[in-house]
Image (tube, rainbow, N blue to C red):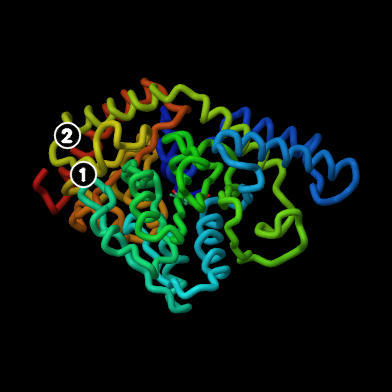
Amino acid sequence: MRDLIAIHGEPSREVYLDSENSGLIYPKALEEMVRTYKEVGYGNPSITHKIGWESYEVLYKSTEILSQILNTKSSELVYTHGATEANNLAILGSAKANKNDRKEILVSSIEHFSVIFPAERLQEQGYKIIKIPVNEHGFIDNEFLKTKVNGSTFLVSIAPINHEIGTIQNLKEIIDIVKEKNSKTLFHSDAADSFGRVRLNLNKLNLDLASFSSHKIYGPKGVGLLYIKEGLKIEPILHGQLSSQKLWPGVENIPAIAGFAEAAKIFDNMDKNMLLKMRDKLIESILSSTESVLLNGPKGPERSLDNVNLSFLYVEGEAIIVELSMQGIYASSGSACTSRVLEPSHVLIAIGRKYEEAHGSVLMRITPFNNEDDINYVIERIPKGVARLRSLSPIKGG
Ligand SMILES: Cc1ncc(COP(=O)(O)O)c(C=O)c1O
């Protein structure tokens, strides 16, 4: 890696647009973490001495903040090491506690792999997994849902916002369909990319389980949450010491939790109009300046306020990512989690993109750390980079 970085050199300007994968932390969240580690939260909150009590106090206050923002009770929130673990706990933990013979699980075909893979693991235990199709913009096929939810449906998992193409689902309508067909069916939402982007009033939505991740809202990595509706039984999937939360065994990462709560406060209160403006400027400019470009996902208010996903035909997305990196612009190609494997994104394939269209995709997320000058720079560089790659490409057309 060092050699690669040395060859790459230091670009004169850097614009980081890869926060779908991970990225910067709010300075105040980092300060809160460091302060907590140094001063008040370095102990184990389950232990009865002064340092333990101080740590417990940080845990308690942070959970209060998060539960207020999400409109839940503190007792309905369980910390995890991120949304991957929260999704696994939601799906595997609820199945473990499932004592009846409802053994069908529906997941949308565009879910994150940390939802799809644990659901598929349950096939070994006799569960049937049904993938819900989506239309060309990534919206759930409600008619399909109506025909598939029945007395055997144990769980349905659909994210409020898609992590790759930014589609905002009509979650209330979807939950109503499911609950009307079978009120016992559990509804889980991977809300890692939805926190602060749509209002998630967990108490009002008829959700049973919802997953969150701190680094998606510019808090520290490695900490997340699972919301578990009061009264719902789920079994632990990790086993260890007797911590205060049996569903997350191990000593709570109090500094990370404090950083998560701080980031949640900042991101929730932030005026997001700037993000929206930058998103639209970037999309509109590239679509009008560059030929043979497709926008993946919907336009306008049904799209997440910070998501940009474009497919450049006749070029490999990976080549664009390296080309942009040389200019100091950091984005990702296709699905974040598949970019080390040259598989086209399952999300783009599900919305009907051809393999070559999916392979030419570039995913960018506008963040509170970006400004208009960044966007102007990206708007100027992308068309040039794409034109250069197309001029070298054997698959012309552009
Ligand atoms: C929708 C979605 N779910 C889950 C995850 C995994 O989150 P974490 O990194 O906190 O495990 C991600 C991360 O990219 C995501 O985008």
Q: Position of residue 70 (x, y in %)?
A: 54, 38
The residue sitting at 17% across, 47% down in the picture is 313
Q: Nearer the viewer, residue 237 or 148?
A: 148
Q: Secondary structure at mark 1?
A: strand
Are discs 1 and 2 less than 8 Å apart at CB?
yes
From this viewpoint, which residue is outermost toward the left? Answer: 397
Please determine whether, in this image, residue 247 is positioned above or below residue 170.
below
The residue sitting at 76% across, 57% down in the picture is 243
Q: Secondary structure at mark 2?
A: loop
Please determine whether, in this image, residue 41 is positioned above or below residue 276.
below
Q: Position of residue 194 (x, y in %)?
A: 44, 41
Circle 1 sits on which residue? 312
Q: Position of residue 50 (x, y in %)?
A: 89, 41
Residue 114 seen in this snapshot: no
Three-letter amino acid code at disc 1? Phe
Three-letter amino acid code at disc 2? Thr
The residue sitting at 40% across, 66% down in the picture is 153
Residue 267 left/right relative to 347? right
Q: Nearer the viewer, residue 26 or 211?
A: 211
Distance Cα–Cα, label 1 vs label 2 = 9 Å
Classify the position of the C terminus by image quarter. top left
Circle 2 sits on which residue? 290
The residue sitting at 36% across, 55% down in the picture is 180
Residue 55 left/right relative to 202? right
Picture quadrant of residue 156: bottom left
Binning the other alpha carbons within 10 Å of mark 1 as few (below 14), some (14 to 19) or many (20 upward) gives many
